[in-house]
Image (cartoon, rainbow, N blue to C red):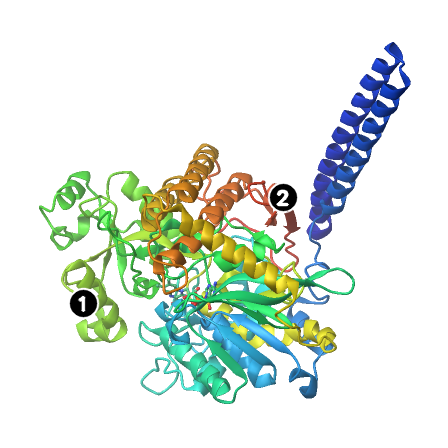
């Protein structure tokens, strides 16, 4: 019911705006005609009259065109357009698979698919598509597929196996994910994700992924934020690495068989669009730069799949790998793929605090540490001051003077509240002056209770490598003194809009993993990104892409000598030449740091209309500075790290702006998006479901033009939207 009403309301709103725009344009034109006619009436020389009428007629035609365009594009994305299958929630995916088009084995051999990315999403997709018989061209920036950012994932991967017999189920995983995302994700996709989560574990175990096991040999689980069950499978603090090795072994097998052609150290710089017989543009290839030689090369495929990861590095300092970037997303966006919910960025509560201005990376302490670690700050301001001045250490503060603020505020979930809630609570304590560290921007994560309860050996077995990492970076032993942590940018829930088939709004262009707008709504729960990336790559895309490719079997391989490829390559060359020619005074990192500061201060954990408007102004200045004053040493036709970074920064600047625009539009707080104007008396996020229960899809309108907003209303047919409650 809510569905129809909301769609109608949204459609009405957009249509209303279109009509207004059309009216405005027409009124302008009529006014002009009237003015000219009056002039003619005063001086009726024939020639002038004819010219005036002609000119007026032209204006009317233009106004009509504008009106037509606005009306045509003023659309909402309906469930049908998002290709959400009919039927009950738990039957949708099965129904889809039963009725989708298939490609037979002989035809699969005739079809080529480009997969950009070798993270968990890209590698699993490339391996699966090749295993099925398609020819795959797989690209990554790193020197080995195994070095994709996914390798950094520490804590674990969720699945609804219910091995612990603690009440878990597919529905409960679905529900926790929808609720965790603050009711801003698509129900059908999230249910499918929960449904295939169990297959992922089976697949990975079959590949030999060494998940942690209990004494009896069964797979072990731990808990992550936003859940009251233990459903997280893990391999010490290296889950991403072990999963990636599994996907990599599947990929290597296909490389060995000649079904995957691997291009390491290649960076896609554009997507090539070719119009079909009906004049509709389709993704038919990419332009990529060989990062070792600097050579620009062209590649054709019948479909293009992008699994390029998230854009958290827009903030400069983040937990992401240094090469993580948003350029592939921007290339898709510029070709007409909608950028959905760009403002949804996740701030992770347990990162090692920033320690100086020359730092280029932040380090995550896995969320798994919140299973046994307790988070606190001093109760007394004078203790906080002493800690900040380095006069005492955390262990010197007696139990009764410690404020376990998460346990105090959220008794039901305690230290395992979702990340957005834990991050904001840490900020609140630090803003109030209770923060520790010399900056006052940190809280404690303390294992002294766990060590007493379980023994140091058990704690070391569970988290040893993380403790070691902490000690190496901070030079303090976390077994003896509580760790210090502070929130940092970690993940981007926003990304390229995809339909149920993971196809973008551009035909033949698919997007998977963190790069798409994902199933996590406004906040991702821990251990759900690995689940989503592998679900997309192993179990969803290999089915859905066939529905597209089945219609492409008659399309012959196209030559990369076609003008579309030549033009795309020329544009890439021109952009590189423009950048190299600037030879200004500021390094890429200097400008990126400035962008990062603006993002953190104005588009960070707390946002206001004022701060966002200010951010847009400042980002525009940074953009101007970048394009006039950046300095890139070296040459374009050889290995050039600075050039690579500059190309990525050019896009980060655009993404930063888009994030601010989206955050400004979303006049509510939900999940990781906290608009300070919209909060409850207790400082919790205040959603405005009547106005903002939609996916905000931004459509590119051209360089330096404001993007257009298209809405996908979110329908909650199978869950009741509630205010998130982690207290009771
Ligand atoms: C420190 C850390 C710990 C984490 N821990 C967990 C965890 O425990 N559990 C969990 O669920 N999630 C975790 N996450 C999140 C999770 O790791 C990521 O969301 C996920 O790995 C992203 O996978 P992906 O395949 O989408 O992208 P990535 O792994 O980022 O891979 C992107 C790929 O795209 C390639 N690429 C990008 N652009 C281009 C281009 N233009 N041309 C060619 N190639 C390109 C890259 O080379 C790379 O191969 C963690 C994240 C971080 C930062």
Residue at 82% in and 24% down: 30
The residue lying at 54 percent from left, 65 percent from top is: 287
Q: Which of the two labelled residues, at mark 2 and mark 1, occupies the earlier sequence position?
A: 1
Q: Secondary structure beneath disc 2?
A: strand
The CA distance from mark 2 to mark 1 is 57 Å
Quadrant hosting ligand 1: bottom left
- For this view, does 456 lie left or right of residue 308? left
**Along the line of sight, the residue nearer the viewer: 723 or 325:** 325
Image quadrant occupied by the C terminus = bottom left
> Within 8 Å: ligand 1 and the Cβ of disc 2?
no
In the orientation shown, which residue stands out farthest toward the bottom? 257
Q: Is residue 411 visible?
A: no
Residue 420 circle label: none
The answer to whether residue 188 is above or below residue 691 is below
Expressed as whole percent of the image width and height from the top left, the position of residue 470 reads: 22, 63
- Asked if residue 9 lies left or right of residue 705, the reply is right
The answer to whether the residue bearing label 1 lies less than 8 angstroms from the nearest atom of ligand 1 is no
Disc number placed over residue 452 in the picture, else none: 1
* Circle 1 SS class: helix
Residue neighbourhood size for the residue with mark 1, other residues' Cα within 10 Å, grouped as few (<14), some (14–19), many (≥20): few
Across and down, in percent, residue 43 comes to 86, 11
Q: Identify the residue at horizontal 27%, vertical 58% (top origin).
A: 374
Task: Name the spot of residue 311 as percent of width and height, x first.
Answer: 45, 56
Q: Which mark is residue 708?
A: 2
In the rendered image, residue 185, in percent from the top left (x then y), is placed at: 57, 57
In-front residue for pair 267/691: 267
């Amino acid at each position: 019911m809510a569905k129809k009403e909301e769609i109608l309301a949204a459609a009405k709103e957009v249509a209303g705006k279109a009509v207004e725009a059309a009216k405005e344009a027409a009124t302008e034109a009529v006014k002009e005609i009237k003015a000219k006619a009056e002039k003619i009436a005063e001086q009726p020389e024939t020639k002038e009259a004819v010219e005036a009428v002609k000119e007026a007629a032209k204006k009317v035609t233009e106004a009509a065109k504008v009106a037509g365009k606005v009306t045509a594009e003023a659309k909402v994305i309906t469930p049908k357009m998002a290709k959400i299958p009919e039927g009950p929630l738990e039957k949708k995916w099965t129904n889809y698979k039963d009725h989708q088009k298939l490609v037979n084995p002989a035809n699969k051999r005739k079809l080529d698919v480009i997969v950009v990315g070798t993270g968990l999403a890209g590698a699993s997709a490339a391996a699966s598509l090749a295993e099925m018989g398609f020819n795959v061209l797989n690209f990554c920036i790193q020197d080995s597929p195994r070095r994709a950012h996914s390798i950094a994932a520490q804590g674990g991967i969720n699945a609804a196996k219910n091995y612990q017999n603690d009440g878990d189920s597919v529905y409960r995983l679905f529900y926790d994910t929808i609720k965790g995302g603050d009711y801003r994700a698509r129900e059908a996709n999230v249910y499918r994700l929960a449904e295939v989560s169990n297959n992922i574990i089976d697949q990975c175990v079959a590949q030999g992924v060494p998940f942690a096991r209990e004494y009896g040999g069964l797979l072990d689980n731990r808990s992550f934020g936003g859940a009251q069950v233990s459903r997280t499978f893990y391999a010490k603090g290296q889950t991403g690495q072990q999963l990636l090795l599994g996907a990599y072994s599947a990929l290597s097998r296909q490389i060995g068989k000649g079904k995957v052609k691997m291009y390491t150290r290649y960076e896609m710089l554009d997507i090539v669009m070719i119009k079909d017989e009906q004049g509709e543009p389709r993704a038919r290839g990419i332009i990529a730069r060989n990062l070792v030689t600097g050579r620009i090369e062209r590649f054709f495929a019948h479909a293009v799949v992008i699994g390029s990861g998230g854009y958290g590095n827009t903030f400069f300092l983040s937990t992401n790998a240094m090469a993580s970037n948003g350029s592939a997303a921007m290339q898709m966006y510029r070709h007409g793929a909608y950028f959905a919910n760009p403002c949804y960025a996740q701030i992770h509560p347990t990162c090692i605090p920033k320690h100086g201005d020359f730092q280029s990376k932040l380090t995550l302490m896995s969320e798994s540490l919140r299973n046994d670690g307790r988070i606190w700050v001093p109760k007394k301001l004078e203790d906080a001051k002493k800690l900040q001045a380095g006069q005492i250490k955390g262990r010197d503060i007696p139990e009764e003077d410690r404020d376990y603020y998460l346990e105090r505020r959220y008794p039901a979930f305690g230290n395992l509240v979702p990340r957005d809630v834990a991050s904001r609570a840490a900020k609140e304590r630090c803003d109030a002056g209770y923060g520790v560290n010399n900056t006052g921007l940190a809280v404690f994560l303390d294992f002294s209770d766990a060590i007493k309860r379980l023994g140091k050996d058990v704690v070391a077995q569970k988290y040893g490598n993380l403790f070691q990492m902490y000690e190496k970076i901070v030079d303090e032993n976390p077994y003896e003194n509580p760790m210090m942590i502070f929130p940092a940018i970690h993940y981007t829930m926003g990304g390229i809009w995809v339909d149920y088939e993971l196809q973008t709004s551009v035909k033949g262009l698919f997007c998977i993993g963190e790069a798409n707008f994902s199933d996590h709504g406004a906040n991702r729960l821990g251990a759900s990104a690995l689940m989503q990336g592998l679900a997309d790559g192993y179990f969803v895309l290999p089915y859905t892409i066939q529905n597209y490719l089945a219609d492409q079997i008659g399309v012959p391989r196209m030559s990369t000598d076609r003008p579309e490829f030549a033009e795309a390559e020329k544009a890439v060359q021109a952009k590189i030449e423009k950048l190299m020619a600037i030879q200004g005074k500021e390094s890429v990192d200097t400008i990126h740091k400035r962008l990062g500061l603006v993002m953190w201060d104005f588009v960070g954990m707390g946002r206001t209309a004022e701060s966002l408007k200010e951010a847009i102004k400042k980002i525009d200045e940074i953009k101007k500075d970048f394009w006039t004053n950046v300095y890139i040493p070296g040459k374009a036709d050889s290995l050039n790290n600075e050039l690579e970074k500059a190309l990525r920064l050019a896009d980060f600047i655009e993404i930063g702006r888009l994030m601010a625009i989206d955050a400004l539009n979303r006049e509510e707080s939900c999940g990781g998006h906290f608009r300070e104007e919209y909060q409850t008396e207790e400082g919790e996020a205040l959603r405005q479901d009547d106005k903002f229960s939609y996916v905000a899809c931004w459509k590119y309108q051209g360089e330096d033009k404001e993007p257009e907003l298209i809405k996908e209303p979110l329908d909650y047919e199978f869950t009741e939207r509630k205010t998130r409650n982690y207290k009771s």
